[in-house]
Amino acid sequence: MRTEQPKTIYLKDYQAPDYWIDETQLTFELFEDHALVHSRLALRLNSDRHGAGALPALVLDGQELALLKVVLDDQELGEGEYQVDEDSLSLQPAAATFELALTTRIEPQNNTALEGLYKSGSMFCTQCEAEGFRKITYYLDRPDVMSRFTTTVIAERERYPVLLSNGNPIASGEHEGGRHWVSWEDPFPKPAYLFALVAGDLCLLQDSFTTMSGRTIDLRIYVEPENRTQCDHAMDSLKRSMRWDEEVYGREYDLDIFMIVAVNDFNMGAMENKGLNIFNSSCVLAHQDTATDMAFQRVEAVVAHEYFHNWSGNRVTCRDWFQLSLKEGFTVFRDSEFSADMNSRTVKRIEDVTFLRANQFAEDAGPMAHPVRPDSFIEISNFYTLTVYEKGAEVVRMLHTLLGEEGFRKGTDLYFERHDGQAVTCDDFIKALEDANGADFTQFKRWYSQAGTPRLSVTADYDATKREFRLHFTQVCPPTPGQPDKLPQVIPVRMALLDRDGKEMALQLNGEALGNEAVVSITEAEQTLVFENVPTSPLPSLLRGFSAPVKLSYPYSRDDRVFLAKHDPDGFNRWEAAQGLAVDVLQGLVDIHRAGRPLNLDQRLVDVMRSVITDAELDAAMVAEIIRLPSEAYLVELAEVADIDAIHFAREWLRRALAVALRDDMAARYQALAAAGAGEFSASAPAMADRSLKNSLLGYLMLTGEQQVLGWCVRQFVEASNMTDRQAALVALVNSPFEQQREAALADFAERWSAYPLVMDQWFSIQAMASQPGALERVEKLMGHPLFTLRNPNKVRALIGAFVNQNLSNFHAIDGSGYAFLADRIIDLDRSNPQIASRLVTPLSRWRKFDDERQALMRGQLSRILAEKLSPDVYEVVSKSLA
Ligand code: TRP
Ligand code: ZN
């Protein structure tokens, strides 16, 4: 049992540090069974907080360290002259400025939490965000302490020919006994969370970039030798990101060298360490033979994200971890705009909105709901959330919408200029946007402090005699843990009014002409807008581009949605109308199925699907998005009490019914796309769009159960010129009733790709997600596969994560077996990697969504976990889930 309760940290308790660290000199001696870390810190009293009186004690953060030596101003301290406990080293300085030299001993080879200095395969690497530096040496491990770092790495030359750290290399040399060293100097003061070190036998893809001021930057991607041929796409993405940040934000890169290192064992996607980004190999490596188009796009987005952090995160950083969205929300907004510019803007927006609504909305409605700027936490690692990242990006997007492109740029220019080299808050960001534009975001800032997804209900009436169209808005933000009452938020609604031909009408509000499309701000709990001079009763096209992260409702009929899906000039809202129709149809089917009546197919949905499948003008990627039915997860999120069996049944039934109804149109388009794509592989956006549609059609067609389609699918699996097509065929086979072909394809795939860990991750995932009954046994069996290991986060995500998050009907099996399985894995993983264990709790935390029987089972498993001796990470999520 737990002995002491982990303690909660509050934003309101923030205090500036007692001391600053102006200089940090580090020397690492790396060995196979330990590492020695020598640090030399130039410390200075924070005179803003302390006057001439007695000097405060110096309290440095440190965890799991063996302290070997403490030297204060060249005097070695004896045991009584400092205090060490579980997570700190304290001592009493004698002067306002002083030098402290420490030596600690750590064991990177035994670090399974992948936080601090650890080994991934044969290579040493670090992950310091958020509070991992304290597992390397004692330090003021907080983002508002910024220091100039010089780092020397010493290791055996044979095993570790490449020795890297932040900044520029300044010296290197040989030691006796086959050891060598390299020194790195980072001229930009930075918080410890941006520190990085890598040592390994790595090979390198090198390129260069000329900045807007004409400086040449040395670009390097370091990977293990066998991956050398899979780096081109990441390098191209990096160069495009660097150009884009210059063009769109006026931001130039600042060091002479920029490095990316790919590692196989990594808790998250990647990390923006100054000048030395460390990446999960899944976010670097991409080759058409081994990576899908989706993986290519993820690499592009993550490379951009980490690169953009150089300004939004590194040059201007966070004062404290409550401000995390300052860098993450802003940087996600930046990378999503970059991806929108590189690919299809509308499709990118559809993907982001789909993801947000299925996942972040669920978080906002669950026990871990928190504001974009949380006001308390137990373990900060638990707050790298969809709310901080994705909702945070939506908040920045709204600011962009309200200020317009130019006003927003003026604001960010001022922000970067005013705060360069500082550790600041979300308020500072808003203040810069306000000051540059003369804007007032006082009320808008509630988006940072209020949790929960606002509901925006809209009704309308048309007065033919007055030629007035009135829109009546009601906003309600639901209660969330710790926040029973909410105030109205600023909700920007991008909108148009459509006439009977689907043409946009001229908008006039309070005598002012607004053009055909406008952004109106809803700021009150109840608010009515009266549009004037409206000749005929219009159909409103609301919240275009999802201009605010809210749940919009408007009493559209199914016919209205069909009309909008076909005629709305706004591409995003055309998709939204089709989705809305599909949601409405599915919810109807769920109800009918629950009532025990036979299901029937609404021909209007068939009609909309047919019209897009046969529309050769429409972007194929858009067609693929429109015919994709809303996910089970999203339908669960929308339901008051989710009947997962009925949802799964209705959705599968509808997919099959659509496939049967549209069989010939789908087959014709599939064949045409297969023929068009048969030539040489292309990674162009149109080629990717074609593959996306082709494979989505294949998935439908396989549901007809026809032998002929099976033939197409097997042929695609065998003859595919790329992983996207091969994998799509495998997915279709695995989810089909053709057992023999399914097993043959799985075996063939495993044999062919067993040497490629990232491809095998896909192989594990596809099986974990297969929705036939019996998936849990398959997953349990796969845990014993020689290539599976709980020590690698990618493997855990691929098999266990995919099963519990994407195979809802099996995970929620009414016998509770899925829940018990997950609880066992969480308890087990918490001993080796608390961050990964904690993330796995999410599906259990959503127990309130389900029926009484499942609620009891899920709570039972949460209680069983809580009875264990837990990390603060898992403790926080589990205890809050049960509260
Ligand atoms: N700053 C990283 C990003 O968003 C996030 C990150 C990488 C991280 N590794 C981590 C956060 C480990 C917590 C723990 O790009
Ligand atoms: Zn980030």
Image (spheres, grey):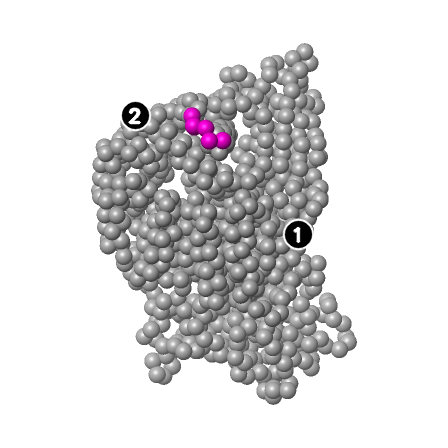
Crowd rating for badge 1 (residues with CA inside 10 Å; few <14, some 14–19, many 20+): some
- Residue 668's place in the image compared with 145, above or below, is above
Crowd rating for badge 2 (residues with CA inside 10 Å; few <14, some 14–19, many 20+): few
Please report the residue visible at 68 percent of the width from the left and 70 percent of the height from the top.
18
Q: Of the numbered discs in the image, which one, if any, rests on residue 428?
A: 1
Please report the residue visible at 55 percent of the width from the left and 59 percent of the height from the top.
863
Q: Residue 406 in the image: x percent, y percent?
A: 58, 39
Residue contact between numbered discs 1 and 2, judged by CB atoms under 8 Å: no
Residue 528, by quadrant, is: top right
> Is residue 90 rendered to the left or right of residue 756?
right
Q: Tag 2: residue type? A: Asp
Q: Tag 1: residue type? A: Asp
Q: Quadrant of the N terminus?
A: bottom right
Please report the residue visible at 62 percent of the width from the left and 69 percent of the height from the top.
4
| Predominant SS along the magenta part | loop
Q: Residue 761 in the image: x percent, y percent?
A: 35, 54
Highlighted magenta segment, given as a residue range: 595-600
Quick one: 371 or 334, which is closer to the camera? 371
How many numbered circles are shown? 2
**Residue 604 within the segment the image draws in magenta:** no
Residue 258, by quadrant, is: bottom left
- Residue 708's place in the image compared with 176, above or below, is above
Q: Of the numbered discs in the image, which one, if any, rests on residue 664?
A: 2
Q: Quadrant of the C terminus?
A: bottom right
Please report the residue visible at 49 percent of the width from the left and 47 percent of the height from the top.
335
Q: Residue 597 in the image: x percent, y percent?
A: 45, 28
